[in-house]
Amino acid sequence: MKMIVTVVKGIWYYFWGHVFAWFLYDSMYIRGRWFAGKLNGLCSVGWQWVTHDAVSSLFSLNNKGAKFPISQQCRVINPQNIFFDPDDLNNFQSYGIYYQALGKIVIGKGTYIGPNVGLITSNHDLTNPDQHLEPKAIILGEKCWIGINSVILPGVELGAGTVVGAGSVVTKSFPEGRCVIAGSPAKIIRKMERSK
C-alpha cells in the first residue's frame, strides 16, 4: 500500500511540476540529480519542490521573478544575481536561508549551505542606514560547506573546500580554500590536506 501511495504522489507532483515548470522556470534548472531517480524521475524530490514553490508563489509575493524553485522558507532578493549549478538546487530548499543578492553571488558546484545562513552583498551605510553601500560579490568555491546560522558578508571569497563552522560571521576572504574557519569574525582554525 505504501508503494502505491508513493507512486500516486509521485505522479501528482510529476504532472503538476511539469505544468508549473513550463511557464515559471528556466528549463536549465529543471534537470540533474533532483529530477532523476526512481521510475525515471517520476518520484523525484525535484518535482515536489517545483510544485510546492509554484503553488506558494501564486499566493504570495515571496521570491518573485526567480527562474528556479525556491522554498518559501528561504528569502531571495534579486535571484537573477545568483549563479549556481542545477545539481545544487537543494541550497534553495532549506529553512531560513537569506540571499541578499544586490550584488552577484556565485555558488561553486557541490557546495552545501546550511539552514539560517545569510549571504549579504551590501551593508547599510553607517552614516545613513536608509542607504546601502555599493554591493560586493560573494564567491563560494566548489565543495564548500557553510554551517548553520553563519553569515557571509560583502566581498567574501571562499576557496574550494572551505568549511565554515556553525554560527560564524565571515568578514574577510579565504581564497586559498581547504580549511575550516569559525568564529566572529571567522578565522582559520584548521588547514586540510589536499585530496588525492
Image (spheres, helix red, strand yellow):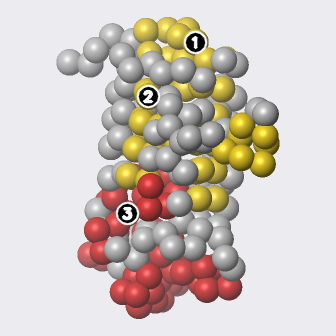
Q: Which mark is residue 34?
A: 3
In primary-sequence order, the first of circles 2 and 3 is 3
Q: Quadrant of residue 56?
A: bottom right
Query: Residue 172 in the image: x percent, y percent?
Result: 54, 20
In primary-sequence order, the first of circles 2 and 1 is 2
Q: Amino acid at mark 1?
A: Lys
- The residue singled out by tag 2 in the image is 157
Q: Secondary structure at mark 1?
A: strand
Q: Residue at 36% across / 86% down in the picture?
A: 22
Q: Amino acid at mark 3?
A: Trp
Out of 69 and 152, give the one closest to the viewer.
152
Q: Secondary structure at mark 3?
A: helix
Rendered position, 109 above or below 90: above
Query: Residue 151 in the image: x percent, y percent?
Result: 64, 34
Mark 2 neighbour class, 10 Å CA radius: few under 14, some 14 to 19, many 20 or more: many
Q: Secondary structure at mark 2?
A: strand
Does the CB distance between marks 2 and 1 fall below 8 Å? Answer: no
Q: Residue at 65% across / 71% down in the picture?
A: 62
Nearest to the eye among marks 2 and 1: give it: 2
Rendered position, 131 above or below 126: below
Q: Which mark is residue 173?
A: none
Query: In whole angstroms, how far apart are the C-alphas of marks 2 and 3?
Result: 27 Å
Nearest to the eye among marks 2 and 3: give it: 2
In the picture, measured across the screen, residue 154 lies left or right of residue 7, that is right
Nearest to the eye among marks 1 and 3: give it: 1
Residue reaching furthest front?
A: 127
Q: Which mark is residue 187?
A: 1
In the picture, measured across the screen, residue 5 lies left or right of residue 196, that is right
Query: In whole angstroms, how far apart are the C-alphas of marks 2 and 1?
Result: 13 Å
Q: Amino acid at mark 2?
A: Glu
Out of 112 and 106, give the one closest to the viewer.
106
